[in-house]
Image (tube, rainbow, N blue to C red):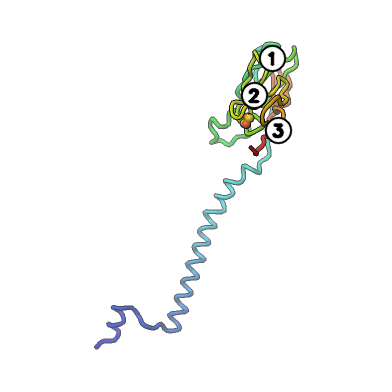
Amino acid sequence: MDTNLAESSSGPLTETPQEISRRRFFEKLSIALVGLCSAIVGVPLVGFIVAPFFRKMPEKWVTLGKPDDFQIGKTVAVTVTDPSSLPWAGVTAKSGVWLRRVSQDSFIAFSANCTHLGCPVRWLEGADLFMCPCHGGVYYSDGNVAAGPPPLPLFRYDVRIANGEVQMKQAIVPISTTL
Ligand code: FES
């Protein structure tokens, strides 16, 4: 009976030392190649995801309109596009501010995001209050907290009039992350 034929049909019963070392070599080579491929794909991917968290907010002034677009004593919503947003941000790059014209040449720009968990606040003209619909946060007209869970007053952006335009300086709005 051909013993080689018997071994090949049911697998080799024993391996020579050379076969064992060759198999181990290929096992290690496979693991190294998998690690290398993972690094080639993974490192740029992780960098792509993490990099935006370490980007500094560029010092940019955003135009809100001409002074005469706004009535003295009124608080209105203005949509702004974040100039530091990533190209694929789409509508998420848009946010809002509440702009109040205090006098001829004085404006206040409040963040539209509640300092509790970031929900958009609404200005209630009749009540003279900002209200947050999410958890009942209430702010006075100057942005200070009147009631509810917000830990901080509404954030105020720096505002200036330059080149005949009302402009606000982009900033990272502080928002609490605790309930
Ligand atoms: S997010 Fe405004 S009160 Fe919670």
Disc 1, SS: helix
Looking at numbered disc 3 in the image, what kind of residue is underneath it?
Answer: Pro
Quarter of the picture holding the N terminus: bottom left
Nearest the camera: 136 or 24? Answer: 136
Is 129 situated left or right of 86 in this image? Answer: right
Disc 2, SS: strand
Nearest the camera: 122 or 106? Answer: 122
Task: Relative to 22, say whether 110 is above or below.
Answer: above
Q: Residues within 10 Å of mark 2 (few under 14, many from 20)?
A: many
Q: Residues within 10 Å of mark 3 (few under 14, many from 20)?
A: some
Q: CA distance from mark 3 to mark 1?
A: 32 Å
Residue 100 drawn at (x, y percent): 69, 17
Give the mark toward the camera: 3 or 1: 3
Give the mark toward the camera: 2 or 1: 2
Q: Residue at x 35, y 80 (%)?
A: 12
Q: Earlier in the sequence, mark 2 or mark 1?
A: 1
Identify the residue position indicated by label 1 in the image.
67
Q: CA distance from mark 2 to mark 3?
A: 19 Å
Disc 3, SS: loop
Residue 125 drawn at (x, y percent): 64, 14
Looking at numbered disc 2 in the image, what kind of residue is underneath it?
Answer: Val
Q: Residue at x 70, y 11 (%)?
A: 72
Q: CA distance from mark 2 to mark 1?
A: 16 Å
Q: Which mark is residue 97?
A: 2
Residue 169 drawn at (x, y percent): 70, 28
Q: Residue at x 65, y 27 (%)?
A: 137
Nearest the camera: 117 or 166? Answer: 117
Asked if the residues shown at circle 2 and circle 3 are in contact, with their CB atoms under 8 angstroms apart, the answer is no
Identify the residue position indicated by label 3 in the image.
151
